[in-house]
Amino acid sequence: MRTFLLAVAVILSGGIWLQAQAPKSSKPQMVVYKSPECGCCLNWIAHMKANGFDVKTVDVDDIDKVKRTYGVPPSAASCHTALVGNFVVEGHVPADAVSRMLREKPAIAGIAVPGMPIGAPGMEMPGGQKDPFAIVAFDKSGKTTIYERR
Ligand SMILES: [Cu+2]
């Protein structure tokens, strides 16, 4: 019994210690730039929040300027542009692909889902239609490669 109580005490104090060590928010912090009129952008933001991202939204009048600033190649452009860690996330990229990039930290500038494919996160249709799409990676020079196909 005494050993049991001791074990419980050790576990509890360990838990308190871990909590004290944890950063205030362990969620990945993301900033999303979008035009104020963009509805599907809001749907994608909801998707990212539902998957554990801490999202701050910034409405901008000139979203193309944001894309130029962060080096999104025109061929990879979509509606919204997001920053997370040292990476750029363009368009309706699935949250798990963003998480993989943050985990693996590849030598790229960011990933994008060019255009607005039907059925991508935030682009869901009432009938459940889903078009296949590619997630592309781009580097600082604007070169794109296929990151994943969905
Ligand atoms: Cu969109």
Image: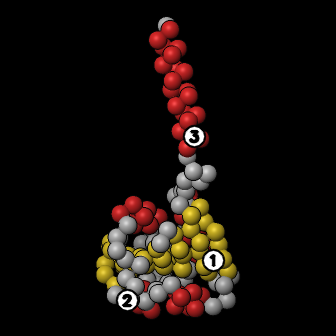
Q: Which mark is residue 69?
A: none
Question: Residue visible at 38% across and 89% down?
Answer: 142
- N-terminal of the pair, mark 1 or mark 3, is 3
User: Residue 100: horizontal and vertical position, in percent?
Assistant: 39, 63
Question: Residue visible at 63% across and 77% down?
Answer: 39
* Mark 3 crowd level (few <14, some 14–19, many ≥20, 10 Å Cα): few
Report helix, strand or loop for mark 1.
Answer: helix
Kindly identify which residue carries mark 3. Answer: 19
Is 40 left or right of 87, judged from the image as shown? right
Looking at the image, residue 16 lies above or below residue 47 = above
Asked which quadrant contains residue 41, the reply is: bottom right
Closer to the camera in the image, 44 or 129: 44
Residue that protrudes farthest toward the top in the picture? 1
Residue type pointed to by label 2: Ser
Closer to the camera in the image, 12 or 135: 12
Residue type pointed to by label 3: Gln
Question: Residue visible at 42% across and 64% down?
Answer: 102
User: Residue 139: horizontal and vertical position, in percent?
Assistant: 37, 82
Looking at the image, residue 59 lies above or below residue 49 = below
Q: Which quarter of the image is occupied by the C terminus? A: bottom left
Kindly identify which residue carries mark 2. Answer: 141
Q: Would the CB of label 1 be found within 8 Å of ligand 1?
A: no
From the viewer's perspective, is the residue at label 1 or at label 3 nearer?
A: 3
Report helix, strand or loop for mark 3.
Answer: helix
Asked which quadrant contains residue 65, the reply is: bottom right
**Rounded to the nearest whole Å, what is the CA distance between mark 1 and mark 3?**
38 Å
Report helix, strand or loop for mark 2.
Answer: loop
User: Residue 15: horizontal and vertical position, in percent?
Assistant: 54, 33
Kindly identify which residue carries mark 1. Answer: 39
- N-terminal of the pair, mark 2 or mark 3, is 3
